[in-house]
Every structure is written in structure tokens, then in C-alpha cells.
């Protein structure tokens, strides 16, 4: 390992690291404290996260995360493009669940513009966000297992995720960057083949998840690497602003699908999974159980999904269908106006948040009545969850840092925006 | 009694000298307070047994470019008890571009305020660790201000040393 010099670390970061108040004292430790640089290019940091660790022997005394290696200035870009144009960019926020981000964006824009998508479109949106949740949690579980040394499970969970990507492929023609939703609906109705594939997927999923769980839950190495590691109490978790599985792993029953229902989640019967321990193992249990609840929701969605339009008929706000643009004058004019000048929602500001796989994804818009947002703030769950990392790793071994990062499952695409 | 009346009543009772304004728009409640009262009002909103806004979801700012008070700092807070969301807005002028930090009330405010400082240049006094969040420390500009060009400023980001 190369030794860090003063030039490698900015003096202000070093100062923050050395000033960090810490109550960790180790008897009989090595004489010298060491500063270890982890990342930004490190396979276990799930992207370009950089951590500076102050070590006493093998114990972490303090930790300072450095963000910004993937900062693309999405909030500035959003101020300079119309609400429609930004939909593909939401794919690149949390790139493990692009569908859920698409849904979150259009829900926020619809709230601002005061329109509502037809019921069938809302049911489809619910179905794709639950599938996205399963896909994201599968990657989280697999990567966590791989971080602590169980390589097989990663391949098994990614095999399951691959089936969801195949559904995306039929549904919208893209596997990763979906951009499937539209303001006032979805891009196209769900095809019979895609529907059949969803039905097939939910029928075989639980059996395959059980298989993965048998590999993990009875694996002593896996359990002991996570049990009691990175504990955060319910009070601290709320204070640090954690949301999603990281918060529910500390026993706080907060799920925005239940607390502030959007789409048709108030009609769905599902359980908000919580585990009281607050350690890395309980965060893993929450994720695994949540995918089962998602399957339950998808079953109900498929049962209740009504027939009808998937796009709102509201010419001033919603892009018309392509076939109509080529054959009718009115639609051509509306298409031209929306593409060139935007949908001009009334002046005002709204904050709209949904429960994404990682936690609460919120969009805050300020509109001045123009086609572009005056301000767009992205409240990304990974960014906020990462803030608890110094608290979680304090006093743990340096090898546990990897397991803890895996258990809070950050995606740097949305943490850095 | 709905939330608007409860908050108005409680604030009037506990802070008689503080001007507050409550606005409702699209089922969202917004509370406007003056800059010097932000910390005590936030502390009260969090600790009052009837309100319990314990979760701070987001802190950001708006640059109005040409208005008298150029910036507005916006806090989005959530009550786990009543499942209500509240936006708290505070105007900040460019000539005195600073506001007290609420990191002592909610720990999560730490990074949100660092991000706001990084993007808008609003200084948060009494902040435990006010550094830039995303941009390098040497960067001189505040990217989300309206006078910062979308294409960036050539030469403003130093290249890494070889």
C-alpha cells in the first residue's frame, strides 16, 4: 500500500478528520494512529465514494466521507431544460432502479401542473416501481453478500434481476435506462407478452429467493460478519435523516407508501417490514422481506388493474400520441408547443416524495410559470443515508467498513447528483 | 383543528414577538419566519409534543436573482407522529449572506447545509464542519446561483497535478 503524503489529502479534509469528536479509545493499541484512504476507486465502495479513515490499529476511530466524484450538476441542468427533457436524466440518478425514479419525477411534475394520470397508467406505474424495488434490493443483497465474501449469492440474485431487465426490454425497449413514464401517463400500454412475463416472474420468484436465503441465513460467516455490526438506534436513525430500509432496520415504521399514500397504495394490502436491532443484518432482512411484500403488491395490482387509456387527454400539458401528430393539425401544434416551450405549470412550489428502494426520493420544484423549472432540488436517499456512515463505522474494524457500506446500499449516481 | 391552526396557535402562544406567516398551497403547508428566529422555531417544532417534526427531510435554497431578498432557504420537515410535512422558509439577503445553522436541532442538517453552502454560498453560522460538499475546496464560484453559466467557467476547475 502506498503511503499517503500531505499533498494527497486536502488540509481541510485532514482537519475535519482529526477534529472529529471521538470517544473510541483502544487499550494496548499500536503507538501511531494511521490515516487510510479508501476509494474513490475501490470495488467495495459501490461507486466513487471516497472515505478517509483514522485508524488505531485495526479499529476505526473516525471517518470522513468525501463526495462529489460523480457530481454532474443535475440540478443546474434541470433548470435549463423542460420537464419532459429531464425524464431520461432521472434514469441516471439511482441507476439500479431507473423506473422508480421516472415515476417519482412525473408524479412531482403532475402535482405541480395539477393533473392526474388515468387509473390504468397509475396501476402500471405501481407495478413497475415494485419490480424496480425487487431489482434494486436483489443487487443490494447480492453485493452485500459479495462484500463479506459469499460470491455465489451475487450470481444468483443477479440472475433474478436479469429476468426483470428482460421485462423492461419488452415493456419499453431498454434494459437499464428506461425513461418509460410520461407526464400524464406512461409511454405505452403494457404488452400481453410483458404481462405474461411478469406473471411468470412473480410465481417463481419466492422459491428462488428462498434458495438465496438458505445460502445466507444459515451461513455462519455471513451472519457473524453482519450481526451487531454498524448499529444505529431508532432515535439516531431519525436524527440522521435515514429513510428506507436503513430506517426500518432500526425499528421505525416509516414507509411513505403507507404514511403519505400516492398512486393507489392506500388500496393495497402490504406489511411495512421492520426489524428492531438496527445492525447490518437487520437491514439485510428488511430488504429480503420487502421484496416479498412487493410481490404481494404486484399480485394485487395485476388483479385490480382496470382497462382504459394509459395517457391523459390534456393537450396543453401532455404530449399527444405520435400517430395523431402525423395526421392531425391540432395535435401537431400542441406537440410543437410542448416540445419547444414546455408545459408551463402555474407559478408556485411543490415538494413531492416517493418511497424509492433506497429511501425517500423527493423532488422540490419552484415554478415561475415557465416551461423550465426555476429551481429543482433532488432529495436523494443515498446522499442522506451516507451521512450516518461515520456514526456507523466508529469503533468497528476496518474490514467491517465494507460490510456497513454494503448494508446501507448507497448509489453514488444519486448521492452525487 | 387542522395542522395550520394548531401550528399558528402554538407559535403565537410560545413566541409572542415572532412574526410568522402560514400559507397553504396544493395541500402543502408553508411556514415563513424571520432569519434570526430560525433555530428556536425549529427546535420548538421538533420538541413540542403535539407537533414532533423529528425528521428533517431536506434543506435547500432558492436564488431569486433580482428580488430584494435574493435567497430563500427552505427546510422540509416531517412529523412521524401526525405524518404531516411542513416547509419552513426564511429569506436571506445577499448583503448579509448567512443564517444560523440548525445542525444542533437535526444532525442530518449538517450535510444539507454544506450542500447549500457549496451551491449558493450561503454561510451557516455555528455549523460544526462547513466545507464544500461536492465541488473542490479551491473552487471560487457557487454553481447553482443564477449568474453562474450552465457551461461553466473555463479554467475554474484546476486539473490534477501530474
Image: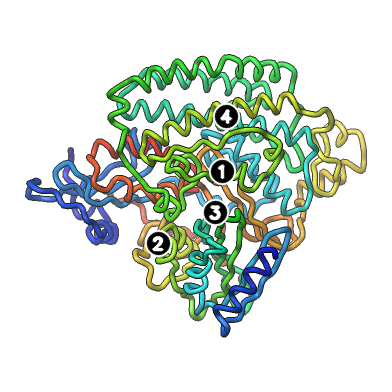
Q: Which mark is residue B80?
A: 3
Secondary element at tag 2 = loop
> Residue A393, located in which quarter of the rendered image?
top left
Looking at the image, is A180 positioned above or below residue A70?
above
Closer mark to the observer between disc 3 and disc 2? 3
x and y percentages locating residue A412 in the rendered image: 44, 42
x and y percentages locating residue B40 in the rendered image: 48, 74
Between marks 2 and 4, how big is the CA–CA gap?
46 Å
Between marks 2 and 1, how big is the CA–CA gap?
39 Å
| A77 and A375: which is toward the camera | A375
Looking at the image, is A82 positioned above or below residue A278?
below
x and y percentages locating residue A6 in the rendered image: 20, 55
| B130 and A153: which is toward the camera | A153
State which chain disc 3 sits on.
B
Residue at image coords 55%, 50%: A74
Q: Are marks 4 and 1 on the same chain?
A: yes
Residues at discs 3 and 1 in contact (Cβ within 8 Å): no
| A94 and A58: which is toward the camera | A58
Between marks 3 and 2, how big is the CA–CA gap?
39 Å
**Sequence-wise first label, 4 or 1:** 1
Amino acid at each position: 500500500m502506498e503511503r499517503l503524503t500531505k499533498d494527497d489529502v486536502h488540509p481541510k479534509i485532514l482537519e475535519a478528520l482529526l477534529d472529529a469528536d471521538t470517544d473510541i479509545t483502544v487499550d494496548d493499541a499500536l503507538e501511531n494512529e494511521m490515516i487510510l484512504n479508501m476509494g474513490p476507486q475501490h470495488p467495495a465502495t459501490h461507486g466513487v465514494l471516497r472515505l478517509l479513515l483514522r485508524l488505531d490499529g485495526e479499529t476505526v476511530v473516525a471517518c470522513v466521507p468525501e463526495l462529489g466524484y460523480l457530481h454532474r450538476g443535475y440540478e443546474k441542468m434541470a433548470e435549463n431544460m423542460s420537464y419532459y427533457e429531464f425524464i431520461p436524466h432521472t434514469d441516471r440518478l439511482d441507476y439500479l432502479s431507473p423506473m422508480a425514479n421516472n415515476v417519482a419525477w412525473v408524479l412531482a411534475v403532475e402535482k405541480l401542473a395539477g393533473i392526474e394520470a388515468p387509473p390504468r397508467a397509475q396501476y402500471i406505474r405501481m407495478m413497475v416501481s415494485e419490480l424496480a424495488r425487487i431489482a434494486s434490493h436483489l443487487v443490494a443483497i447480492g453485493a452485500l453478500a459479495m462484500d463479506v465474501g459469499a460470491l455465489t449469492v451475487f450470481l444468483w440474485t443477479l440472475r433474478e434481476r436479469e429476468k426483470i431487465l428482460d421485462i423492461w426490454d419488452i415493456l419499453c425497449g431498454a434494459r437499464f435506462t428506461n425513461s418509460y413514464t410520461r407526464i400524464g401517463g406512461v409511454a405505452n400500454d403494457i404488452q400481453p407478452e410483458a404481462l405474461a412475463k411478469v406473471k411468470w416472474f412473480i410465481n417463481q420468484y419466492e422459491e428462488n429467493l428462498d434458495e438465496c436465503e438458505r445460502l445466507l441465513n444459515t451461513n455462519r460467516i455471513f451472519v457473524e460478519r453482519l450481526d451487531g455490526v454498524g448499529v444505529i438506534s431508532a432515535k439516531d436513525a431519525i436524527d440522521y435523516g435515514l429513510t428506507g430500509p436503513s430506517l426500518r432496520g432500526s425499528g421505525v415504521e416509516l414507509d411513505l407508501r403507507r404514511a403519505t399514500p400516492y398512486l393507489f397504495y392506500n388500496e393495497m394490502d402490504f406489511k411495512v417490514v421492520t426489524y428492531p436491532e438496527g445492525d447490518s443484518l437487520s437491514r439485510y432482512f428488511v430488504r429480503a422481506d420487502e421484496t416479498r411484500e412487493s410481490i404481494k403488491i404486484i399480485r394485487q395490482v395485476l388483479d385490480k388493474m382496470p382497462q382504459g387509456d394509459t395517457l391523459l387527454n390534456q393537450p396543453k400539458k401532455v404530449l399527444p400520441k405520435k400517430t395523431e401528430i402525423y395526421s392531425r393539425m391540432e395535435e401537431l401544434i400542441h406537440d410543437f408547443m410542448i416540445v419547444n416551450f414546455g408545459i408551463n405549470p402555474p407559478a408556485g412550489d411543490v415538494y413531492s416524495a416517493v418511497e424509492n428502494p433506497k429511501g425517500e426520493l423527493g423532488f422540490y420544484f419552484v415554478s415561475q410559470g415557465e416551461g423550465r423549472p426555476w429551481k429543482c432540488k433532488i432529495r436523494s436517499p443515498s446522499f442522506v443515508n451516507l451521512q450516518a456512515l461515520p456514526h456507523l463505522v466508529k469503533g468497528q474494524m476496518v474490514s467491517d467498513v465494507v460490510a456497513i457500506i454494503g448494508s446501507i446500499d448507497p448509489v453514488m449516481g444519486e448521492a452525487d447528483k | 383543528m387542522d395542522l395550520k391552526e394548531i401550528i399558528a396557535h402554538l407559535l403565537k402562544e410560545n413566541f409572542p414577538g415572532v412574526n410568522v406567516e402560514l400559507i397553504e398551497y396544493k395541500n402543502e403547508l408553508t411556514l415563513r419566519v424571520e432569519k434570526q428566529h430560525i433555530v428556536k422555531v425549529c427546535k420548538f417544532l421538533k420538541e413540542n409534543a403535539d407537533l414532533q417534526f423529528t425528521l428533517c427531510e431536506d434543506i435547500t435554497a432558492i436564488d431569486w436573482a433580482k428580488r430584494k431578498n435574493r435567497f430563500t432557504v427552505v427546510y422540509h420537515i416531517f412529523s412521524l407522529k401526525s405524518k404531516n410535512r411542513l416547509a419552513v422558509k426564511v429569506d436571506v439577503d445577499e448583503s448579509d449572506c448567512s443564517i444560523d445553522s440548525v445542525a444542533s436541532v437535526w444532525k442530518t442538517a449538517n450535510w444539507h447545509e454544506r450542500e447549500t453552502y457549496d451551491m449558493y454560498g450561503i454561510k451557516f453560522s455555528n455549523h460544526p464542519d462547513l466545507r464544500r460538499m461536492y465541488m473542490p475546496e479551491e473552487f471560487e464560484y457557487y454553481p447553482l446561483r443564477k449568474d453562474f453559466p450552465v457551461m461553466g467557467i473555463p479554467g475554474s476547475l484546476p486539473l490534477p497535478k501530474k
